[in-house]
Every structure is written in structure tokens, then in C-alpha cells.
Image (tube, helix red, strand yellow):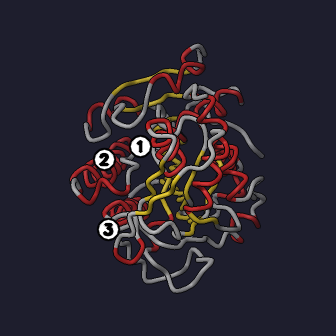
Amino acid sequence: MRSLPARVLVTGAAGFIGSHLTDRLLSLGGEVVGFDNLSAGDKLNLAGAMEDSRFRFAEGDLCDFEATRHVLGEAELVFHLAADPEVRVGVEDPDSHFRQNLLATYTLLEAIRKRAAPTKLVFASTSTVYGEPSVMPTPEDYGPLMPISTYGATKLGCEALAASYTQLLPLQVITFRFANVVGSRARHGVVYDFIMKLRENPRELEVLGDGTQTKSYLHVDDSVDAFLMTLDDKIWRNAVEVYNIGSEDQTNVLTISEIVTSAMGLKNVAVRTTAKAGGRAWPGDVKTMQLDISKIKRMGWRPKRNSEEAIRLSAKELIRELQIG
């Protein structure tokens, strides 16, 4: 049975996915507290939520224990999306991933531990925890997990910390390992990057790597549908559950460049690849990714769109949102 607890906390509420989740939770009639330090998020993403009397926004950093303890309050369900979402940041500033991903999660878990009340935690993790797996589509029980970026490593560390805390207090954890999520309000990722580059120079598009990077893409609406699955008690089967969330196919970066170029109404755009070693866009970039989503499908979730459909819709949404054309 799907029902909202009396109080829900969303960390990273002003971010890309967090703001969409907040909107959907409010549409279901619940009280939602949003927490964000606005390092990656934007309060404009919460314009609609701010008009709802059942929503309260708190600006602050999860690394601040007292602020985190205060905002946690009596929340029975916590959606933990706060993070530094840029994988390539780790090339020059791994400290950001350590603080905003690992330390922030530790602080949240400590606040939950010291409150000592029954809590359900839904953690937004990533396909990058798998590194470059030899099995594809990759199932949740694949191992060993060997991330090739600090982003993936810190997210894996967060998963492990959360799992360990279930042994210390009345805590249940669901971890969602997401494929690449795209859609409106995104301010990073390949679709947004291409749109911004083409707005700057509509005659040429730089593609990082060799363009053959092939991955799964998921529209943000489908990702929010997955989060809402956690309102059903049947998905909370054990102290810790891990689910892959993604599409059932892949597309490559050169195809995405064609989709975005077409959506912007541009023709004869020269595509220039940077052709990094191994075809990667940057050190730590996973070249190929597709998740096995059979486990979450058995629980009743499946994506409404495939990768190319998600990319096409995302491009249209962002072009309209950014008022291009």
C-alpha cells in the first residue's frame, strides 16, 4: 500500500532530481522538508514547491551535524540525494567528492543514529560503483566492485556506511544505483553540455572522448517513479536492499550529438572529437554501461522510455527551459 509518512526529508532537494522528487511527493499530499546547500542545486527548481504550505526549505550543509540533526527532526522517511554530481570533478578536486558525498552521508547517518528512532533511508547511488564490469547488463550482485572515479568510489563508500548503520539502530536502507538520468532542470551531463556548446558555437560541436562511449539513459520522470516505489511496504524486504534503475538499452555519444543538433534545428554542424586515450572523455569516465534491471522490474517498476527517447525528450525540455531558439 502506498502512503506517505507524516514527515519526509529530501536532501539535495533543490537539485535536478531532488526538485522533481519534491514536486511529486507534494502532489501526493505529504509534508516535505527540503535540505540543500545550493552548491549544485538552485532554489528556482523549487519555485512550485515554495508555494505549497506543506513544504519547508532549509538551506544548509549536510557536513554540519547540528544543521543536519535539526532538519532531520522527526522525519520517518529520508530521500538522500545530496551529492557533488559531477564525475569529472574528481580529476582535479577529489576533496569535493569526499566531503559532499562520503562525509555528508556519514553526518546524516550519525544524526539518524543519535536520534535513535525507526527510519527508512533511500539512497541515490550510481552505476559508476561497478567500474568497468565484465558482465553486461550488470546485476546488483556483480563483484568485485572496482570504481574508476572518485565519484563512484565515494558513492560506494556511502552504500557501505549506510549498510553498516542498519546494524546499529532501527534503520532500513534502499539503495538505487542509477544509470545516467536526463531531463528538465539538469545543469550537468552530456545533453546539457552539448546544448550549451552549440548555443555558443552553432557551427561546431566538441565531443569529449572519441564519441563511441555507449551507456544507458533514463528520463528523470522514470527515476522519480522508482523513488515513489519506496512508499510501498513490499519493497522494504530486508535491512538493506539494492536495486539497479536504468533503461534496457544503450546509445552512444555521437548519436546524442545528432539528436541534440536536430532538436536545436541546426544543420551541417562539424563534430570534433577529442579522442582521449582509450576513447574516454576524461580519466574515470566509464566507456560502456548497461544495468540489469530485472530485480526492480519484479517489484513493478520499468522505464517508460528507452535511452534515445529519454535523450530526445530531455533535449526538447532543456531547449525550451533555457529559451534557446
Q: Which residue is mark 1?
A: 82
Depth check, mark 3 against mark 1: the one in front is: 3
The residue drawn where x is 35% and y is 60% is 151
Q: Which residue is mark 2?
A: 100
User: SS of the residue at dot 3?
Assistant: loop
Residue 283: assigned label: 3
Which residue type carries mark 1?
A: Ala
**Closest to the observer: 319 or 225?**
319
User: SS of the residue at dot 2?
Assistant: helix
Which residue type carries mark 3?
A: Pro
Residue 283 location, x and y as percent?
Answer: 32, 68
**Considering only order in the chain, which callout, 2 or 3, is on the residue closer to the N terminus?**
2
**Closest to the observer: 114 or 186?**
186
Q: Is residue 119 left or right of residue 230?
A: left
Tell me if residue 146 comes above or below residue 207 in the rendering: below
The residue drawn where x is 30% and y is 53% is 89
Tell me if residue 199 comes above or below residue 232 in the rendering: above
Tell me if residue 162 comes above or below residue 53 in the rendering: below
Local crowd size for mark 1, using a 10 Å CA cut-off: few (<14), some (14–19), many (≥20): many
Q: CA distance from mark 3 to mark 1?
A: 24 Å
Mark 3 in CB contact with mark 1 (< 8 angstroms): no
Mark 2 in CB contact with mark 1 (< 8 angstroms): yes
Residue 318 location, x and y as percent?
Answer: 59, 36
**Considering only order in the chain, which callout, 1 or 2, is on the residue closer to the N terminus?**
1
User: Residue most toward the bottom?
Assistant: 134
Rendered image quadrant of residue 22 = top right
Which residue type carries mark 2?
A: Gln
